[in-house]
Amino acid sequence: KDFNGKCYISSGLNPSFDTFDCQLHEFHTESNKLIGNLSWRIRTPDGGFFTRSAMQRFVQDSIHPGILYNHDNEYLHYKDDWYILSSKIQNEPDDYVFVYY
């Protein structure tokens, strides 16, 4: 329930996805799932861009609550499992969630 808000990605390690300009991932919880609304821009050869978006639904592992499963997405056809390595959520400016995926 505490994983709500925006995450901007400016640089990542996956050249097929993480390097798009202006990525915005907005998260909220819904029916015991973490919902990610993803938006990103793809540059065109003429200097413009077009925007793409997708929705991810993460389900928490019932035994290991630090694992979130995301399979069978409509637009993004891959498994995107998240492993929460560390977090501090106390409604403070220095709150964080450190995720390995």
Image (cartoon, rainbow, N blue to C red):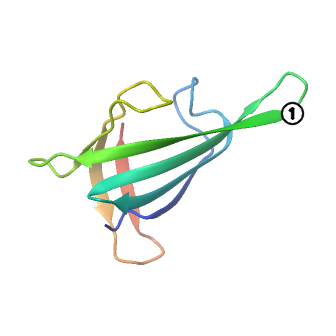
Q: Is residue 23 left or right of residue 12?
A: right
Q: Quadrant of residue 88?
A: bottom left
The residue shown at (91%, 25%) is 46
Q: Position of residue 74 (x, y in %)?
A: 45, 32
Q: Quadrant of the N terminus?
A: bottom left
| Farthest right residue in view | 46
Q: Quadrant of residue 22?
A: top right
Q: Position of residue 38 (x, y in %)?
A: 55, 45
Q: Position of residue 64 (x, y in %)?
A: 13, 47
| Farthest left residue in view | 63
Q: Nearer the viewer, residue 2 or 37?
A: 37
The residue shown at (40%, 62%) is 96
Q: Is residue 43 left or right of residue 22?
A: right
Q: Nearer the viewer, residue 4 or 35?
A: 35
The residue shown at (61%, 44%) is 39
Query: Which residue matches tag 1?
Result: 48
Q: SS at mark 1?
A: loop
Q: Quadrant of residue 58?
A: top left
Q: Quadrant of the C terminus?
A: top left
Q: How many marks?
A: 1
Q: Is residue 10 above or below residue 28?
A: above
Mark 1 surroundings: few (<14), some (14-19) or many (≥20) residues within 10 A: few
Q: Position of residue 48 (x, y in %)?
A: 86, 33
Three-letter code, disc 1: Gly
Q: Is residue 45 above or below residue 87?
A: above
